[in-house]
Image (tube, rainbow, N blue to C red):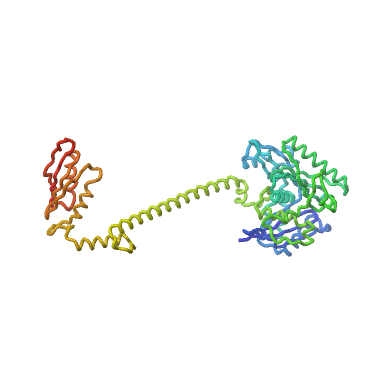
């Protein structure tokens, strides 16, 4: 079953949208749009008009909205916490950040990205005024959209690019626009640093200033937090990415080549991205990254206060839930494997028993060439043999010999030390001769046989020691 995911990028000058159809086989582009915000509109009227046009043109209903916002109102801090429990971190994070914040902590929304290291966690903490979050939520609510996730635009792009690269190399993403540049530093797949730098006029000094600020920030991060960032590649996007020159393929920053974020269009499982001029302009790439964050469950920070309890619980305890699920799966798989092996073992034993039964039957009745059900065929053959024979039963006898043998077999267990040497059967009694270990055993055998329904009485005719003195000879008379 597929679902619709909307990547929505709201900047001061425009609204950009990318709609994906997400299914098991991957994500397919459904529609996209770019909507400039009129400078003649005051306050948020221009944004609202752009959103209304977008919803009307793209026909957005029943979509999961991922909203990307500029970093104008977002604060960033790098701190270290001496424990790994995310729930505790969320509880103490406002108090850790309070001395460095310009407004009271109760007026802010917090989130963080954590990296475990040597018994503690390095946190990149984000904070934004609740008032600003409520403002964008109300704007979207006016066009019947509810943001499941709210995060900085470039943050989503940086995480998606790191997923594509997948080589563990450090990288920088520079999101230009709005009178400032926001730099995201990624190391080992995690965003470790976010900083915002002001922008001057166009020209080489801007690049030199940006290089200086980035180098100073990375050096300070190494000295204060012992976090080393050595970028192997730099990516650039945003409305003012032209500061790096028209030929971005030959541009560089501190000697590191600068690349476009068009690599996002090659994201695994992503389909149907057109080779049109509007896509080649790079205008839709960051909105695409926002949609991919949800479509591919890339995760990360989220400023949305609209999360469901289930979503919040999943984000908080995702690692423990996955670990527990894996453990349960292993246990269930082990139990199932045991059952399968047990069934196979029983099948093997039954096959061996069937083979033995067939072997006994064919050796006993070699004249029967076709064996279908050996047990049933043997019972029929025994019945036929008993009906046509005069030897198993004596003429005039009230009890069959086979019943006498059966009674002896049932009443005298294997544990009894007895050696039967002779059995004489007449029409009204049986005389059984043999030897055993003690006189008590003779009495025990007599008592056992008296319990049968075949014999009316059992008498010890004789019982004496053998010459060796080790065995007792006996003779029992059993009437019927």
Q: Nearer the viewer, residue 49 or 199?
A: 199
Question: Is 362 or 77 nearer to us in this picture?
Answer: 362
What residue sits 85% from the left and 43% below the top? 208
Q: Position of residue 431 (x, y in %)?
A: 13, 49
**Quadrant hosting residue 58:** bottom right
Which residue is at a point 21% across and 61% down the rendered structure image?
Answer: 386
Taking depth in this image into account, of 191 and 348 the one nearest to the observer is: 348
Q: Compared with residue 329, is residue 281 higher up or lower down, i.e. above or below?
A: below
Total labels drawn: 0
Q: Position of residue 27 (x, y in %)?
A: 67, 59
Q: Is residue 131 visible?
A: no
Report the side of 166 relative to 44 (left or right). left
Left or right: residue 304 compared with residue 407 = right
Percent x, y for residue 111?
68, 45
**Can residue 244 be seen here?**
yes
Residue 273, percent across and down? Answer: 72, 60
Judge left or right: residue 469 versus residue 54: left
Query: Which residue in the rendered view is the most extreme toward the front?
Result: 367
Pick the residue in front: 464 or 129. 464
| The N terminus: image quadrant | bottom right
């Amino acid at each position: 079953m597929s679902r619709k995911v909307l990547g929505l990028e709201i900047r001061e000058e425009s609204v950009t949208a990318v709609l994906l159809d997400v299914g098991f086989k991957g994500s397919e582009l459904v529609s996209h749009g770019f909507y400039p915000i009129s400078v003649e509109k005051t306050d948020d009227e221009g944004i609202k008009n752009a959103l209304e046009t977008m919803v009307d043109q793209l026909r957005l209903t029943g979509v999961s909205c991922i909203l990307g916002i500029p970093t104008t109102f977002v604060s960033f801090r790098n701190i270290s916490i001496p424990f790994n429990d995310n729930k505790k971190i969320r509880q103490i994070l406002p108090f850790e950040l309070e001395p460095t914040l310009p407004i009271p902590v109760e007026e802010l929304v917090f989130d963080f990205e954590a990296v475990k290291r040597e018994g503690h966690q390095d946190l990149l903490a984000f904070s934004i005024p609740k008032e600003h979050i409520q403002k964008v939520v109300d704007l979207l609510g006016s066009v019947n959209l509810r943001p499941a996730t709210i995060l900085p635009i470039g943050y989503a792009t940086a995480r998606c690019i790191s997923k594509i690269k997948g080589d563990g190399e450090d990288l920088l993403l520079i999101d230009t626009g709005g009178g400032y540049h926001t730099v995201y530093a990624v190391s080992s797949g995690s965003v470790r640093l976010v900083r915002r730098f002001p922008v001057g006029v166009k020209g080489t000094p801007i690049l030199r200033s940006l290089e200086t600020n980035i180098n100073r920030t990375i050096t300070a991060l190494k000295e204060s937090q012992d976090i080393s960032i050595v970028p192997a590649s730099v990516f650039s996007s945003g409305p003012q990415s032209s500061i790096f020159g028209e030929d971005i393929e030959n541009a560089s920053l501190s000697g590191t080549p600068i690349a476009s974020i068009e690599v996002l269009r090659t994201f695994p499982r992503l389909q149907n991205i057109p080779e049109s001029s509007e896509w080649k302009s790079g205008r839709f790439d960051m909105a695409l990254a926002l949609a991919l964050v949800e479509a591919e469950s890339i995760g990360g920070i989220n400023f949305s206060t609209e999360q469901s309890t289930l979503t919040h619980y999943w984000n908080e305890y995702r690692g423990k839930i996955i670990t527990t699920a894996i453990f349960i799966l292993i246990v269930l798989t082990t139990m199932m494997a045991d059952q399968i092996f047990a069934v196979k073992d029983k099948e093997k034993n039954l096959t061996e028993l069937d083979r033995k039964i067939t072997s006994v039957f064919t050796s006993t009745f070699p004249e029967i060439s076709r064996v279908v059900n050996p047990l049933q065929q043997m019972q029929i053959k025994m019945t036929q043999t008993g009906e046509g024979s005069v030897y198993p039963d004596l003429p005039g006898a009230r009890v069959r010999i086979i019943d006498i043998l059966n009674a002896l077999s049932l009443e005298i267990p294997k544990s009894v030390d007895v050696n039967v040497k002779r059995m004489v059967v007449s029409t009204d009694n049986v005389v059984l001769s043999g030897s055993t270990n003690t006189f008590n055993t003779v009495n025990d055998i007599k008592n056992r046989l008296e319990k049968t329904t075949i014999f009316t009485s059992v008498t010890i005719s004789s019982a004496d020691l053998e010459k060796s003195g080790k065995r007792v000879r006996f003779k029992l008379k059993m009437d019927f």
